[in-house]
Image (cartoon, rainbow, N blue to C red):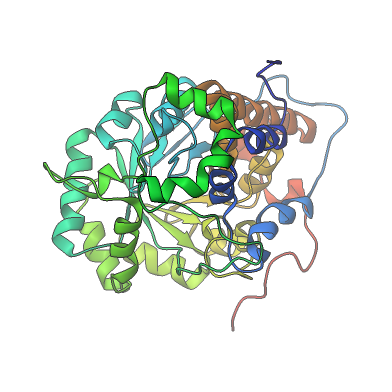
Amino acid sequence: MGNPWFETVAVAQQRAKKRLPKSVYGALIAGAEAGVSMRDNTSAFDELGLRPVTADQPSERKMDTTVMGQSLSMPVMISPTGAQAVHPQGEVAVARAAAARGIPMGLSSFGGKTVEDVVEANPQTFFQIYWAGDRDSMVARMQRARAAGATGMILTLDWSFSHGRDWGSPHIPQSFGIKELLPHALEVLARPRWCMAWLRDRSIPLLRVPNFVTGDEKPPLFFDAYGTWMMTPPPSWDDVAWLRAQWDGPFMIKGVARADEARRAVDAGATCISVSNHGGNNVDSAPASIRVLPEIASAVGGDIEVVLDGGIRRGSDVVKALALGADAVLIGRAYLWGLAANGQAGVENVLDILRMGIDATMRGIGVASIDDLEAANIVMPRDFSPPQPG
């Protein structure tokens, strides 16, 4: 085996593709319909330039900050994603990596590891919840997270159940019976290192969601929980305000993509909003998160914390997001590639890449602190952001 270290997130993705079974890798790619939003999330960053300086570069750069009441060693947080089948340690490995690098962990309701185990690995854990099931079940899941020690709550709303993909959706087994597993036999056997990791752990990917239940209930299978979510009528802003009132700590609303809705989130009592299109998995042709960030930060940045989720692949992306009004960013696919490539060490590798990239970019543009980043540091095309209504 060669050197497990990789120098960019793109290399981590290449290694993940070689290591993971085709259906698992396809589930991480995901996207919706034609993949317009998914591609735009990353390509939009390429349209933004930076203004470098020649002399008077700062000898030290400050990048620590505070978001959702938690100290961050750099303005990066782990976005909640289901790391099902990627690695035997899953979200626990991610949480340990985040803790080792001094940043918070977001745990998805659809994750494969329990909130108790993840909080033990990283006390700076935010629990993510969907508007799924009845009100009593949602409150029960929040109470479980609070009892486990979760420090914040994330309500994810950027999902519209668009399942068609022009390149085809991966076949994910409903369960682990022989009939369900047979179609996956060849692709699994073609990835011996992935198989060996699970054999060494003496486990198999169960595709169950333990944080969807409380008490002694048996965790449902992924698609059973997904069905509950899909059949639950979407919430109104009054519903959102009610759910926020059930949590007495920091509360993020994830999926805001318009200034008017950002103001509604403030009115609902949120302490933080995530500008996101769910990694391009929501309504296809929605603009990239970074394109709508300036509009939202201008509207509510003085009233609420604003973070960006979508398309972050390098440290310069983080700097661009902060210069356009974000307080921090969330990363998703980037750390999943690292997890697939090399477990906890791979996630740490991704975080180190981002840290070094932030530091180098700040030096290059002559900014000593992330608090001093501003739009003047960026070269932005005139038509980069969509026109605002009215």
Left or right: 169 with respect to 319? left
Quadrant into which the C terminus falls: bottom right
Q: Is residue 81 visible?
A: no
Left or right: 73 with respect to 292? left
Seen from the viewer's position, the closer of residues 165 and 22 is: 22
Q: Position of residue 6 (x, y in %)?
A: 69, 24
Q: Residue at x 69, y 59 (%)?
A: 40
Q: Is residue 152 visible?
A: yes
* In this view, 245 is above or below 362: below
Seen from the viewer's position, the closer of residues 253 and 106 is: 106
Left or right: 227 with respect to 169? left
Q: Position of residue 134 (x, y in %)?
A: 18, 65
Seen from the viewer's position, the closer of residues 260 and 234 is: 234
Quadrant into which the N terminus falls: top right
Q: Residue at x 17, y 63 (%)?
A: 135
Q: Residue at x 26, y 44 (%)?
A: 211
Q: Residue furthest bottom?
A: 390
* In this view, 215 is above or below 136: above
Q: Residue at x 55, y 48 (%)?
A: 23
Q: Position of residue 143 (x, y in %)?
A: 16, 46
